[in-house]
Amino acid sequence: MNQEKKNALKSIVFYVIAILVIALINISGKFKSGPCTPNLDVLSVFIFIILNVILLIINGVKAFVMKKETKLSTIVHLAVLIIYINFKVV
């Protein structure tokens, strides 16, 4: 397997683990937010989106400016961001 596919696979594994962790946090009920105090159930989603955007920017710079093999990984990050935006809008 070449390096570009390995980078994309690492990105996919990261998102699978992150989604499972967010789901476990929200299902457990131990980290519920109040009306004025966000707790880990809300903050985990914000952290997920911030990490997504940071990874998208880093991989985009590596792929298109530095000409490294991260185009597939950039596409994975962009797809996750688009899916998240579609779920939040709808």
Image: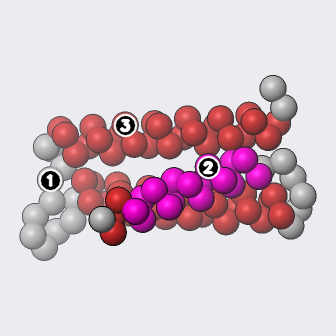
Structural distance between the alpha carbons of marks 1 and 2: 30 Å
Is label 1 or label 2 in front? 2
Task: Identify which residue, 71 or 46, lies in the foreground.
Answer: 71
Q: Position of residue 57 (x, y in %)?
A: 67, 65
- Count residues near mark 3 (Cα–Cα under 10 Å), then give few for <14, some for 14-19, many for 20+: few
Residue located at (33% from left, 69% from top):
89
Left or right for 62, reference 32 = right
Task: Identify which residue, 90 or 57, lies in the foreground.
Answer: 90
**For mark 2, what is the residue?**
76
SS class, disc 2 = helix
Figure quadrant of residue 88: bottom left
**For mark 1, what is the residue?**
32
Q: Position of residue 78 (x, y in %)?
A: 59, 59
Task: Identify which residue, 88 or 27, lies in the foreground.
Answer: 88
Left or right for 40, reference 35 = right
- Count residues near mark 1 (Cα–Cα under 10 Å), then give few for <14, some for 14-19, many for 20+: some
